[in-house]
Image (cartoon, rainbow, N blue to C red):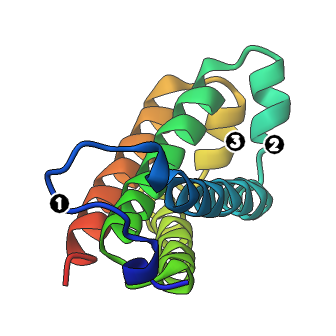
Amino acid sequence: MDRASLRVRRVGAHPSPAGLPAFLVYFCTALVAVVAYLFVYTRVTPHDEFKLIRENDPAAAIALGLSLLGFVLPVVSAIAHAANVWDCLIWSAIALMVQIVVYYIVKIPVPNLSARIAAGELAAAIWLGLSSLAAGALNAACMIY
């Protein structure tokens, strides 16, 4: 499906129920992208984010939550600017790769980053999370072509 065939209203017009199919297509696409991101990202990092979050580790929640926001920002941009759903998925995959690269770059000045997050150290979590968010904001801006 391309964006033109899904577009059911003019820019500036009030949303109507006729736009529901397009909403559902892009919302479900975004959900698939988010699930894929969480699956891949949590396999790349040595610490088990979900286990740590279940154990009430705020560092893991901060790092993963901000990383997720860093991923979602470009997905939002992709939804707004992509020509079609496939284009949106391709840009979402690129956003995922950017977040993984950011994780490895952020580890350079803090080589024991994962161990520190697993130990509940907030400084390491905030460093990773905000770096991921910054990269996501830049990534989203760069997708406006």
Residue 14 at what x, y percent from top left?
A: 24, 42
Mark nearest the camera among 2 and 3 is 2
Residue 129 at what x, y percent from top left?
A: 45, 42
Q: In whole angstroms, how far apart are the C-alphas of marks 2 and 3?
A: 10 Å
Residue in view at x 53 percent, y 51 percent: 20
Q: In whole angstroms, how far apart are the C-alphas of marks 1 and 3?
A: 49 Å
* Front residue of this view, candidates 22 and 135: 22
Give amino acid for label 2: Asp
60 sits to left or right of 54: left
The residue tagged 1 is 11
Label 1: which secondary element: loop
Dot 1 alpha-carbon crowd within 10 angstroms: few under 14, some 14 to 19, many 20 or more: few
Quarter that holds the C terminus: bottom left
Mark nearest the camera among 1 and 3 is 1
Ranked by sequence position, the earlier of labels 1 and 3 is 1
Q: In which image quadrant can residue 48 be found?
A: top right
Q: In which image quadrant can residue 141 be found?
A: bottom left
Label 2: which secondary element: loop
Q: In whole angstroms, how far apart are the C-alphas of marks 1 and 2?
A: 44 Å
Total marks in image: 3
Label 3: which secondary element: helix
Q: Which mark is residue 115?
A: 3
The residue tagged 2 is 48
Ranked by sequence position, the earlier of labels 2 and 3 is 2
Above or below, comparing residue 55 to residue 1 in the picture:
above
